[in-house]
Amino acid sequence: MDTIQLHPRSARVTPAALKQFMNGYFTGVTIVTSVDGAGRPHGLTCNSLVSVTLDPPTLLVCLDRGSGTLTAVRERGAFAVNLLSEQARAAAEVFASPDPDRFAAVAWQPSPHGKLPQLTDDAFAFAECMVTDLHAVGDHVVVFGRVLDVAGEPRNPLLYGMRTFTGPPVPSAAGSLPTPR
């Protein structure tokens, strides 16, 4: 098998080029939340969520190094993932903004176990995670979390791609897949 040699110094990809590349990749939208050492809630819109392993159940999220949410996650040693429903665009936008009082714009309550902010009207599912590892990569930190509790049930998710929020496509009879025989 032939291998391709990559030369990182000669292949400079700009942030704008990477954004353009990722533009057509639609992904679910979450709000990652935590509570800082003083008990104040923090949260941000995030579409960097990955299920890492089922045993032990582990998720990862990527958080900006300068975010207050990352500081709260480090202080608390825990975070929550709120999977947003299709109707939660306003919540996604406010948690992506610099608004210092994001939680005033949404209905939320402390979760039953970790007392982490759970978005009651905008999230269709919720996971509480204990931080197991942090790994700095560029301007973000990859946060690994052992899933301690989950709640909710599947609904149509909010998606992000092509620099806009949208819902899942609605299948049509003409565009449906044939039934297996």
Image (spheres, rainbow, N blue to C red):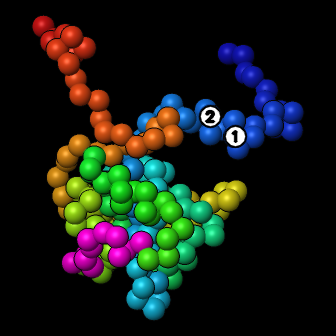
Task: Give, as a three-letter code, the residue at label 1.
Answer: Ala
Q: Considering the numbered disc 2 on the image, is that residue within a helix, a strand or a loop? A: helix
* Residue 127 image offset from top left, x and y in percent: 30, 63
To which quarter of the image does residue 15 belong? top right
Q: Quick check: 175 above or below 11?
A: above
To which quarter of the image does residue 142 belong? bottom right
Task: Give, as a three-letter code, the residue at label 2.
Answer: Gln
* Residue 181 image offset from top left, x and y in percent: 12, 7
For the record, the magenta segment spans 102-112
Q: Residue at left 75%, top 37%?
A: 13
In the rendering, which numbered label is found on residue 71?
none
* Residue 105 image offset from top left, x and y in percent: 34, 70
Q: Residue at left 25%, top 14%?
A: 175
For the residue pair 54 and 174, the one nearer the viewer reads as 174
Q: Residue furthest left?
A: 181
Can residue 64 be seen here? The reply is yes
For the residue pair 73 and 107, the one nearer the viewer reads as 107
Q: Quick check: 19 above or below 115?
A: above
Q: Quick check: 134 above or below 2?
A: below
Verify CB contact (< 8 Å) between mark 1 and mark 2.
yes
